[in-house]
Image (spheres, coloured by chain):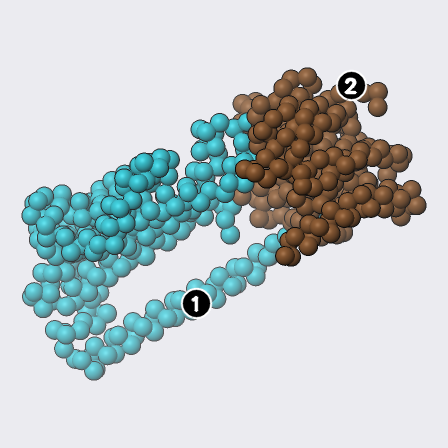
Chain colours: A cyan, B brown
Amino acid sequence: MADAALTEAQTQPGWGSSLASGLKARAWGLGSIAGGLLIWELISRFLVGNKLFLAAPSQVVVAFIELTRSGELSKHIYISGLEFLLGYSVACILGILLGLAMAQSTSAKQALQPWVSGLYATPTVALAPLFILWFGIGIMSKVVVVAVLVIFPVVINTEAGLRTTSPQLIETVRSFGANARQIFFKVALPSALPFIFAGLKLGIGRGLIGVVVAELFGSRAGLGQLISQSAETFNMPALFAGVTILAAAGIAMTSGFGWLERKLLPWRE
Amino acid sequence: MDMPVKLSVDKLTKKYNTLEVLRSISAEIHRGEFVSIVGPSGCGKTTFLRIVGGLEKANSGEVRLDGRVLTGPGSDRGFVFQQDNLLPWRTVLDNTEIGPEIGGYRNADQRKKTLKLLKLVGLAGFENYFPRQLSGGMRQRVNLARALAVDPDLLLMDEPFSALDAQTREIMQTELLRIWEEGRKTVLFVTHQIDEAVYLSDRVFVFARRPGCINEIMEIDLPRPRPLSMKRTPEFVAYVDHIWKLIEEDVRASVLEEHA
């Protein structure tokens, strides 16, 4: 019988082939980045030839090293990182709770839905100057901007994830006598987790935009402030250094989330 | 049958708004008996099973299990669903133990029983696989093991093999009989395949439609264990033929209705 069952199992791809295909995919990615940097370097050196308009990657690297040596860069990264982390955490916790409330109770859903839909569609980042007026030039205003930008995709995805729970799966656990609490924790929540993760991932990009834009409108430190100050003084290498760090942070956090997702949700493809 | 009555159904009636799905169904099933329900689509056979499982409420009438009136779902019955309905984030083992987990007795003792059960259904070695890694036939084995894991008094099966291809289905029928011989649970099995019902059952309830009611109860007097080759014997074919004649008109009516 075990033999018959074995033939029914899906055959897994071998280790060797998956490793080789992984390397191949990575080779294309790395080659593309290297090629892009090379073209950028050549254009800025020979075609533009003016640091005021476009800084070459090599000049960005030099600026990066200088900013690191002076300790300026770590200060900016610390401030922006703190703003992002606080705003993002608050938004995730509040967003998941609001999403849960909306999925559990129709009155909560009816009360919150117009606000969530309305504010999600609004370019809230345009309200950043207002938040700076209300919460000052310090980190508080940036935390609020980040939180406002991040919370909506989290709420919407949490609610959608819980709402799309398969009625068949709920019925299955109900047939074993499960109560409402057991149905929630054993079926609804686990089936919503991939949606919640997707919301948290969407929030990363929005949160980083929030940090930078809010800092552009008024701040004492942070990567956004570094970027705006560098732009004002036509220091393109420093500007690009700031932008590069933001891009790297975005990529690192998104892929970190991807890794966490594979660890926590191994049952998915 | 000299066995005591396990399940008794008394004047069960079910309506969806004005549509009468089941009209005053009464029947008795004995302990250790394998009973199948066949009938054309729309005859209420699945609704009947779901009411016995406590997943739906009847408008009137009573269902008793060992004399107790049933009012809702419970782990005294194990339900095997048409779709496997496995929780995709749980492994085979964790899916199988969902019933004991809900009942609050998922312990080392239960683990031993579960592993034995998975071996019985032919899934030894697949305990840590996720559903997406299994074939349809294997998922239905988990579906069956999950229902058996609560050690139910009554096993309710709702067309569990209908999504499988013809060959896998025949293998699963022999497998089901092999597993059933081990513990001789009382089984109520819904199918629209007449030969499946005859092959598996001690008795077949033939349902008629609009409203759903029992047209005839047939004793299947064939020896056990039953090899697949029995399906080609004249006795077997005669049973299938007889049941087909009973429901033919209803099936034609339901087919015409579906295509209207």
Q: Nearer the viewer, mark 1 or mark 2?
A: 2
In the image, taking residue A25 as reference, residue B224 lies left or right, namely: right
Residue A88 is at least partly visible in this image: no
Q: Chain of mark 2?
A: B
Residue B247, x across and y down, in percent: 77, 45
| Depth check, front residue: A50 or B145 | B145
Q: Are both tags, 1 and 2, on one chain?
A: no
Quarter location, residue B208: top right
Asked if residue A29 is positioned above or below residue B215 in the image, the reply reads below
Q: Which residue is mark 2?
A: B4
In the image, taking residue A157 as reference, residue A127 lies left or right, namely: left
Residue drawn 65% across the image and 28% down it: B12
Please state which amino acid type lies under the numbered disc 2: Pro
Residue B62, x across and y down, in percent: 64, 23
Q: Which residue is mark 1?
A: A27
In the image, taking residue A234 as reference, residue A170 lies left or right, namely: right
| Depth check, front residue: A148 or B89 | A148
Local packing at callout 2 (Cα closer than 10 Å; few below 14, some 14-19, many 20+) is few
What is the secondary structure assignment of the residue under circle 1? helix
Quarter location, residue B86: top right
Asked if residue B73 is positioned above or below residue B247 in the image, the reply reads above
Q: Chain of mark 1?
A: A
Asked if residue B14 is positioned above or below residue B8 in the image, the reply reads below
**3D distance between C-alphas at marks 1 and 2:** 72 Å
> Which quadrant of the rendered structure holds the C terminus of chain B?
bottom right
Residue A251, x across and y down, in percent: 32, 57
| Depth check, front residue: A148 or A140 | A148
In the image, taking residue B70 as reference, residue B197 lies left or right, namely: right
Residue A248 is at least partly visible in this image: yes
Q: For the image shown, how many numbered marks are present on the structure?
A: 2
The tag on residue B105 is none
Local packing at callout 1 (Cα closer than 10 Å; few below 14, some 14-19, many 20+) is few
